[in-house]
Image (cartoon, rainbow, N blue to C red):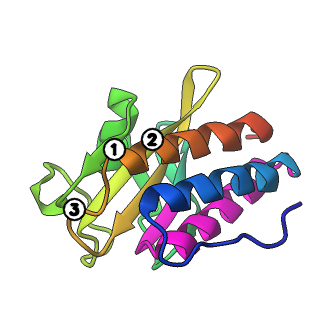
Amino acid sequence: MAEKIIILKNASKVEQYKNLLPQIKALVASETDLIANLANVTAVLETAFDFFWVGFYLIKGEELVLGPFQGPVACTRVTFGRGVCGAALKEERTIIVPDVEQFPGHITCNSESKSEIVVPLFRENQIIGVLDIDSDRLNTFDEVDAEYLEKICVTILQFSTFLF
């Protein structure tokens, strides 16, 4: 198990993701529990990028239920189709929102959130949840984030056992 994650100081976003990806792989490869891996990945991403909120929502029944996260208290349940998480689930794709105030149906869990990215978690071609990251700044996320966060999500699920 990786016991320390090396965060590059003054690195570009691409350099930071390239640095983190193999470390995250090593971290999750040594643990099969999905929740433990989701928890550690939220800590890594929040620490490396100082995001306002990083967390996972997992599908339970007909809604998304809050999983491991880093940041302020969050919405506990999200109905399918609602907000950015629900849209990513419905459209089965990553959604980048430069300004959450401009996203129709945005769910405001915290008024300090200004921009957001949501990445679906696919296991055997079925979505089991989403990675949701909020920033307290506008226009934080781009295609670089989408590319690397999608790779991180694939890596997590490659090594984790889905037990619920």
At label 2, counting other C-alpha atoms closer than 10 Å, the crowd grade (few under 14, some 14-19, many 20 or more) is: some
Rendering coords of residue 116 (x, y %): 31, 58
Do the residues bearing badges 2 and 1 touch, measured as CB atoms within 8 Å? yes
Q: Which residue is mark 1?
A: 143
The residue lying furthest to the top in this view is: 125
At label 1, counting other C-alpha atoms closer than 10 Å, the crowd grade (few under 14, some 14-19, many 20 or more) is: few
Q: Which residue is mark 2?
A: 147
Q: Is residue 41 above or below residue 88?
A: below
Do the residues bearing badges 3 and 1 touch, measured as CB atoms within 8 Å? no
User: How far is disc 3 from disc 1 in space, using C-alphas?
Assistant: 12 Å
Tell me where the magenta segment starts and ends, as one range: 31-55
Rendering coords of residue 10 (x, y %): 47, 77
Disc 1 marks a residue whose amino acid type is Glu
Q: Residue at x 54, y 56 (%)?
A: 17
User: How far is disc 2 from disc 1 in space, using C-alphas?
Assistant: 6 Å
Rendering coords of residue 38 (x, y %): 66, 56
Q: Residue at x 63, y 58 (%)?
A: 20
- Report the side of 97 relative to 60 (left or right): left
> Of helix, strand and loop, which one carries label 3?
loop
Foreground residue among 70 and 47 = 47
Rendering coords of residue 51 (x, y %): 43, 72
Disc 2 marks a residue whose amino acid type is Glu
Q: Which residue is mark 3?
A: 139
Do the residues bearing badges 2 and 3 touch, measured as CB atoms within 8 Å? no
Q: Is residue 153 above or below residue 27?
A: above
- Report the side of 41 relative to 48 (left or right): right
Q: Is residue 73 above or below residue 56?
A: below
Disc 3 marks a residue whose amino acid type is Asn
- Report the side of 36 relative to 141 (left or right): right
Q: Is residue 52 above or below residue 127?
A: below
Q: Quadrant of residue 99?
A: bottom left
